[in-house]
């Protein structure tokens, strides 16, 4: 496991920001491993990700917060400090389609995802065998129109019990309530099986087939109260033709869904994403 720290910064753009941040880290004996930045000229914003080795760093996380606070206040920074050794705790929600879940579990086992999958929650029993194979707690919480509020209360209790920090909707075919989304702002990642903003809502492959599109796609995004309208993290596409039937679109689309969702989870776990103005910046 890496022993690094990552600082994410969002603030009004002005001269001296990079020099000030680099000087602060240098004075505290940081060995900077990666540094990347972006300026949004239209909004006048500066966004930065910097990662450094904690081996010889002079400050603990608590000391960093106290000593960096005056710098952040002077430059009106919104900032987050993430430690690689404090692995992100994740819950996966899934219904009956298991392709995204299978992909995430395999990547996690192989060490590709720097996180801990605490539990899997489903409204169907179909994926229990996968959870048992990988040794991850599995909870079935049925959801109906009349029981939705009660089901979410059960989910809240489990998420709190396991200390979950990020929720991944791996083809979870239920719409979360406004209360649910408000509890986990910018901490719920969904995979939508179309190239948003095209074909929002249910049955996007059916819509794409009826429209006769030549490209289909998949989109991972953060969940907001507005359906399929949250900040987009990653997208990918594949070409289709008049020869492809609906079943072909679904099969090809599933391959995209797996890759697009896993990238989003990995980038979030590695603190590579900054959100602003309903958009994301993904740092290399």
Image: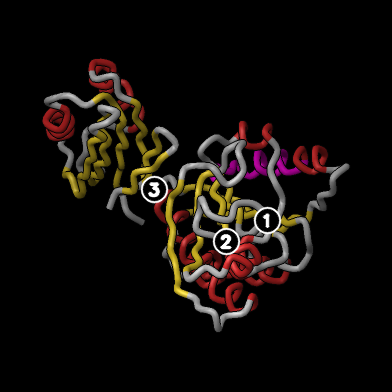
User: Is residue 28 found left or right of 246 in the rendered image?
Assistant: left
Q: Decide which of 219, 74 is in the foreground and name it.
A: 219
Task: Please name which of the two marks, 2 or 3, marks the residue nearer to the observer.
Answer: 2
Against 151, is 59 above or below?
above
The residue that disc 2 covers is 193
What element does badge 2 sit on? loop
Of 221 and 238, the residue lying toward us: 238
| Crowding at mark 2 (Cα within 10 Å: few <14, some 14-19, many 20+) | many
Residue under the image location 79 percent in, 51 percent down: 141
Examine the image and state in which quarter residue 247 appears.
Answer: bottom right
Task: Please give the range of residues in magenta.
Answer: 154-166
The answer for how far apart the CA atoms under marks 2 and 1 are is 9 Å
Residue that mark 1 sits on? 202
Spot occupied by residue 207 in the image (x, y as percentages of width and height): 63, 62
Q: Which residue is mark 3?
A: 85
Q: Residue drawn at (29%, 26%), measured in percent from left and top?
A: 11
Residue 155, magenta (yes or no): yes
Q: Residue 81 magenta-drawn?
A: no
């Amino acid at each position: 496991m890496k022993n690094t720290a990552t600082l994410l910064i969002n603030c009004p753009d002005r001269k001296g920001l990079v020099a000030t941040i680099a000087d602060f880290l240098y004075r505290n004996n940081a060995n900077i491993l990666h540094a990347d930045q972006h300026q949004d000229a239209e909004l006048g914003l500066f966004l930065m990700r910097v990662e450094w080795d904690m081996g010889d760093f002079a400050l603990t996380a608590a000391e960093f917060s106290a000593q960096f606070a005056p710098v952040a206040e002077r430059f009106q920074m919104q900032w987050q400090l993430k430690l690689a050794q404090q692995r992100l705790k994740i819950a996966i929600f899934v219904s009956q389609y298991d392709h995204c879940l299978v992909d995430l579990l395999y990547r996690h086992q192989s060490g590709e995802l720097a996180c801990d999958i605490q539990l899997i929650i489903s409204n169907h029993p179909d994926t229990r065998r996968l959870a048992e194979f990988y040794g991850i707690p599995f909870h079935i919480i049925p959801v109906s129109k009349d029981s939705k509020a009660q089901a979410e209360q059960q989910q809240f209790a489990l998420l709190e019990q396991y200390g979950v920090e990020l929720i991944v909707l791996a083809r979870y075919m239920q719409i979360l309530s406004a209360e649910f989304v408000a509890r986990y702002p910018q901490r719920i990642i969904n995979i939508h099986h179309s190239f948003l903003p095209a074909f929002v809502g249910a049955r996007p492959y059916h819509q794409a087939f009826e429209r006769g599109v030549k490209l289909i796609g998949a989109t991972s995004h953060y969940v907001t109260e507005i359906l399929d309208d949250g900040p987009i993290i990653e997208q990918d596409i594949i070409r289709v033709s008049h020869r492809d039937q609906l079943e072909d679109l679904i099969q090809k689309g599933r391959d995209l869904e797996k890759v697009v969702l896993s990238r989003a989870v990995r980038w979030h776990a590695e603190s590579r994403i900054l959100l602003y103005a309903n958009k994301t910046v993904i740092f290399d």
